[in-house]
Image (cartoon, rainbow, N blue to C red):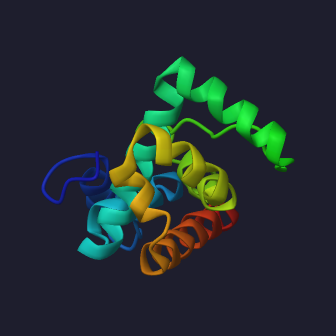
Amino acid sequence: MTGRLSGVATRIKKVAPLCKTMHCMIHRQALISKNMPRSLKLVLDSAVKTVNLIKARPINSRLFTVLCNEMGSTHKSLLLHTEVRWLSRGKVLTRLFELRSEILLLLTDIDEEKSKLFCDDEWLSRLAYIADIFDRLIFEI
């Protein structure tokens, strides 16, 4: 607890007033995703929904694996995003961007609205941007 009025940081500062405090580095991604600009937050949310759409349904996941095998992709599956594992977010977004053409083919059949996102250059640029940001945060830890 690092509350301003109570918590560990406040108690430590009472004993050692010159002590500096900061948020845990592992929580950076969680903090950034809560305070990012709306345009990037919308991209992050739709990217997470896309990954969960493919990974949450076994038939979609199997179809995607077959599609990746047939296209000779480097990766054969998406990584599942969870709110609990903040460190996975950068890897999930990077994998999503790397497999964008395969995802576009799959989404054309299962969710046409989401497939339009993967044709939008502005949305893809923002996806690449936030993937790089989150990926870079992992290296800073």
User: Which residue is outermost to the left?
Assistant: 5
Q: Quadrant of the C terminus?
A: bottom right
Relative vertical location of residue 44 with respect to residue 50 in this rendering, above or below: below
Which of the 4 quarters of the picture holds residue 53?
top left
Q: Position of residue 97 (x, y in %)?
A: 61, 61
Residue at 55 percent across and 35 percent down: it is: 80
Quick one: 96 or 36, which is closer to the camera? Answer: 96
Residue 101, quarter of picture: bottom right
The image shows residue 60, relative to residue 104, as above or below, that is: above
Closer-to-camera residue (84/114): 114
Given residues 86 and 97, the one toward you in this image is 97
Quarter where residue 110 is shown: top left
Observer able to see residue 87: no
Outermost front residue: 109
In the picture, measured across the screen, residue 22 lies left or right of residue 59, that is left
Relative to residue 61, is residue 88 depicted above or below? below
Residue sitting at 24 percent across and 72 percent down?
38
Residue 110: tell me if it is visible: yes
State the residue at coordinates (82%, 49%).
73
The image position of residue 6, as x and y in percent, is: 16, 49
- Number of numbered discs overlaid on the protein picture: 0
Task: Relative to 131, say whether 81 is above or below.
Answer: above
The residue closer to the viewer here, 2 or 119, is 119
x and y percentages locating residue 138 in the rendered image: 64, 60
> Image quadrant for the N terminus?
top left
